[in-house]
Image: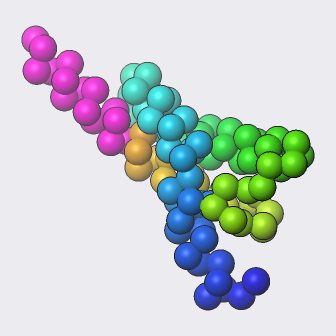
Amino acid sequence: MTPSESLPLLFGLAGLLNPFALLIGAALGWYADARAKLVIAGFAAAALSVLIDVSLAASGVPALGGYEGGPLAVMPFRFLGALVIAALVHAIRKRSRRNRR
């Protein structure tokens, strides 16, 4: 696979916009009690989404987004996507708590 073929996949469902990473990142961002923990939430979401993909591939389900590369190639992109969504959800929760008082 050439770089011109792999970049759309890495910025799409296989990488940056992976639904597993985004959902896990949103959940961890909701429960993060400090901004410093958002980096941990992003990394954990990326790692868990890679584990989900590997377990699905081991059971015979094709990879989400049509990506056939290794898990380490998509990890940084999933980390970035999960970090952004965790920060967004964290900010929304913090703002909603502030408006209640």
Could you say which quadrant of the image residue 67 lies in? Answer: bottom right
Q: x and y percent of residue 95 in the render? A: 19, 28
> What's the magenta region?
87-101
Question: Is 99 contained in the magenta span?
Answer: yes
Residue 21 seen from this side: yes
Q: Is residue 47 left or right of residue 92?
A: right
Which is nearer the eye, 92 or 1?
1
Query: Which residue: 25% across, 33% down?
Result: 92
> Quick check: 3 above or below 61?
below
Query: Which residue: 62% across, 46% down?
Result: 46
**Figure quadrant of the C terminus:** top left
Residue 41 seen from this side: no
Q: x and y percent of residue 14 in the render? A: 62, 60
Question: Is 93 contained in the magenta span?
Answer: yes
Number of numbered discs on residues = 0
Query: Which residue: 12% across, 14% down?
Result: 100
